[in-house]
Image (spheres, helix red, strand yellow):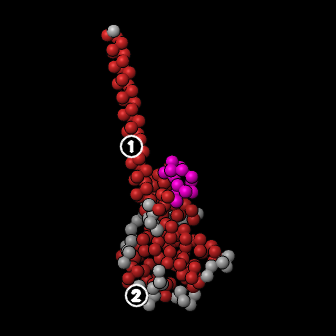
Amino acid sequence: MDSLDTQTLIIVVVVAVIAIAVAAYVLYQKQQSRRLEQRFGPEYAAAVHKLGSRAKAEAELKKREKRVGRLDIVPLTPAEVGRFTQSWTRLQGSFIDDPKGVLIQADQLVRELLVKRGYPMADFERRAADISVDHPAVVSNYRAAQLILSRDQRGEASTEDLRKAVVHFRALFDELLGATTVKDSAGPATRLAA
């Protein structure tokens, strides 16, 4: 009888330990999901949609975090911020005369800014994935601008589409520049309507 009680007690303890371990794992997974959802915002939903499941999306987002964590992303010096800001102001000011040229220049300026900050210039999807780690709120702007740029290269984009692409590039540009007040310093003469 005594050995039966000991055996029963051991079984109850083992079952309890397993239940606690399973509960801890489930809680950890939920916290990880919540953390990724908060960090990546709309990019989280886009990854779930694209990859077809939360588990695959979360694995991809964690992989992005790890890859970008190994990069040496650096802030810009005040002189660099000034130079990039002036370049954007000049670019934006010539939109009316050359919208197609401005779109190409905006893409080039954003790429230059990405390189200066330390992002690798792999293929577009890799760049967008890397950007999404630190700038998830604006990576959709980058994708939208690139989509319009490719439509323009096929002759399928209107001037309004080009304007929207430049506005999308500007949102990413401002975020990468680290100066959200740059828009205000451009002044009304060079601003594009949002």
Near mark 2 (Cα within 10 A), the count class, few <14, some 14-19 or many ≥20, is few
Magenta segment range? 46-58
Give the camera-side residue of 8 and 121: 8
Residue 121 point in image, percent of width and height: 54, 65
Q: Is 162 positioned to the left or the right of 89 in the image?
A: right
Residue 112 in sight here: no
Identity, as a three-letter code, of the amino acid under mark 1: Leu
At horizontal 47% and vertical 62% (from top left) the residue drawn is 42
Label 1: element kind: helix
> Residue under circle 1?
27
Residue 157 point in image, percent of width and height: 62, 79
- Please identify the residue farthest to the left as the structure is shown: 2
Q: Quadrant of residue 25?
A: top left
Identity, as a three-letter code, of the amino acid under mark 2: Gly
Location of residue 33 with respect to 149 vertically, above or below: above
Considering the image in quadrants, where does the N terminus appear? top left
Q: Quadrant of residue 65?
A: bottom left
At horizontal 40% and vertical 87% (from top left) the residue drawn is 187
73 magenta-colored: no
Label 2: element kind: loop
- Please identify the residue farthest to the front as the structure is shown: 1
Real-space CA distance between mark 1 and mark 2, rounded to the nearest whole angstrom: 50 Å
Q: Quadrant of residue 134?
A: bottom left
Give the camera-side residue of 36 and 102: 36
> Residue under circle 2?
187
Q: Is 13 positioned to the left or the right of 120 in the image?
A: left
Residue 28 point in image, percent of width and height: 39, 44
- Please identify the residue farthest to the right as the structure is shown: 154
Residue 48 point in image, percent of width and height: 52, 55
